[in-house]
Amino acid sequence: MAWQDADDAPAAGRGDRLSEAARAILVNRRSRLDLLPAELFGEWPWEVLLTLFVADAEGQRLTGRGIAAELACPPLTMTRWLQHLARTGLVVGDTARDLDTPLTLSLSAITALESYLATSLQTAHLLLV
């Protein structure tokens, strides 16, 4: 799931516009790394939520280790954020013991991301009109 640019990204499994929007946001956010130092963009929890949203839309299950590798996040940092996301009820999976456990988003996380992404699409549409 590591895309360099929007042309490299596979089509969403269900043609889901929201997962396409999430993927575009991830690609856009990662493009910043070509311009500015990486330490300016340490938003690991947000990256995790968007990455899991796209994976879920594609019918994939990711592990904490896989997400850490994809995001170039240190494993210890990923463990801390996954534990926090689980405590807040956003990520489901055994985040306390094992980075190799499959993870998914909770229903509340999916609902929140769908709302955010729908609003983002509406905003983008208004900017293009």
Image: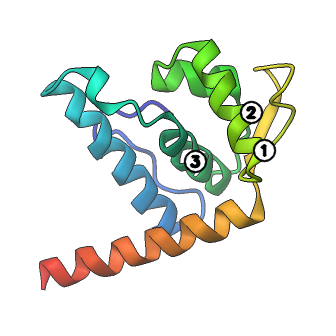
Q: Residues within 10 Å of mark 3 (few under 14, many from 20)?
A: many
Under tag 2, what secondary structure? Answer: helix
Q: Residue at x 52, y 57 (%)?
A: 12
Residue receiving disc 3: 49
Indicate the secondary structure of the residue bearing disc 1: helix
Residue 101 visible in rendering: yes
Is there CB contact under 8 Å for labels 3 and 2? no
Q: Of the residues shown, which amino acid type is indicated by label 3?
A: Leu
Query: What residue would you read off at disc 1?
Result: 87
Label 1: how many residues lie within 10 Å, few (<14), some (14-19) or many (20+)? few
The amino acid type of the residue labelled 1 equals: Arg
- Is the Cβ of the residue at disc 2 closer than 8 Å to that at disc 1? yes
Q: Amino acid at mark 2?
A: Gln
Seen in the picture, residue 17 relative to 83 is either above or below; the reply is: below
The x, y position of residue 71, in whole percent, is 47, 26
Residue at 45% in and 76% down: 118
Instruction: Label 3, secondary structure: give it.
Output: helix
> Can residue 7 be seen in the rendering of this structure?
no
Quote the CA–CA distance across marks 2 and 1: 6 Å
- Total numbered labels placed on residues in the image: 3
Q: Residue at x 84, y 26 (%)?
A: 96
Q: What percent of the width, then of the height, locates residue 93?
A: 84, 38
Which numbered disc flags the more N-terminal residue, 3 or 1?
3
Q: Nearer the viewer, mark 3 or mark 2?
A: 2
Horizontally, is 65 left or right of 8 in the view? right
Which of label 3 and label 1 is nearer to you?
A: 1
Residue 17 lies, with reference to residue 10, above or below; the image says: below
Instruction: Tell me if residue 92 comes above or below residue 3 in the rendering.
Output: below
Q: Which residue is mark 2?
A: 83
* Residue 39: image location, x then y, percent: 30, 21
Residue 9 is drawn in which quadrant? top left
